[in-house]
């Protein structure tokens, strides 16, 4: 059974920034970015334990085609998305 996905404000801001940047580079690329983020989120929702633990209970899912990863934490009924992290940045930033 799929779990409910909850976004922090920071994660929503990350997605918006990524969309805007890709869309400014090529019309339609931002939409493709969001489509692949959504596909990754659906996979996380269906099977949150599939992805690598990176620190304590935090996990990371890699987004296909784009240099982004989704940082999240799972509870019994929900998955909280903390960041949609641009992997071109310093990892210490997160």
Image (cartoon, rainbow, N blue to C red):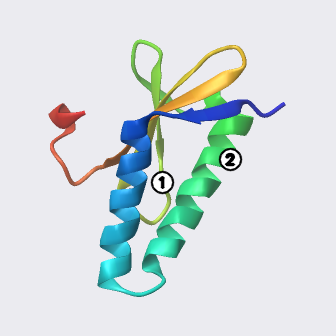
Identify which residue is drawn at 47% across, 28% down. 59
Q: Position of residue 30 (x, y in %)?
A: 44, 73
Which residue is outermost to the bottom? 27
Nearest-to-viewer mark from 1 and 2:
2
Q: Position of residue 38 (x, y in %)?
A: 60, 55
Instruction: Give neighbour class at mark 1: few <14, some 14-19, many 20+ (Cα, 10 Å).
Output: some
Q: Quadrant of residue 23?
A: bottom left
- Distance from disc 1 to disc 2, alpha carbons, whole Å, reads 12 Å
Q: Which residue is mark 2?
A: 42
Which residue is outermost to the front? 9
- In what quadrant of the picture does the N terminus appear? top right
Q: Position of residue 8 (x, y in %)?
A: 45, 33
Identify which residue is drawn at 63% across, 56% down. 39
Q: Quadrant of residue 76?
A: top right
Instruction: Give neighbour class at mark 2: few <14, some 14-19, many 20+ (Cα, 10 Å).
Output: some
Taking 28 as reference, is 26 left or right? left
Identify which residue is drawn at 41% across, 38% down. 9
**Residue 49 appears in the rendering:** no
Q: Is residue 21 above or below residue 51?
A: below
Q: Position of residue 45 (x, y in %)?
A: 68, 37
Q: Is residue 7 above or below residue 75?
A: below
Q: Which residue is mark 1?
A: 63
Q: Is residue 35 above or below residue 12?
A: below
Q: Is residue 56 above or below residue 88?
A: above
- What secondary structure is marked by label 1? loop
């Amino acid at each position: 059974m799929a779990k409910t996905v909850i976004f922090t404000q920071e994660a929503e801001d990350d997605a918006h920034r990524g969309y805007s940047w890709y869309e400014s580079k090529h019309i339609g690329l931002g939409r493709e970015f969001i489509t692949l983020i959504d596909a990754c989120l659906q996979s996380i929702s269906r099977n949150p334990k599939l992805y690598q633990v990176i620190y304590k209970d935090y996990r990371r899912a890699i987004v296909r085609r784009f240099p982004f990863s989704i940082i999240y934490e799972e509870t019994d009924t929900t998955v909280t998305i903390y960041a949609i992290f641009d992997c071109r940045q310093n990892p210490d930033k997160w």
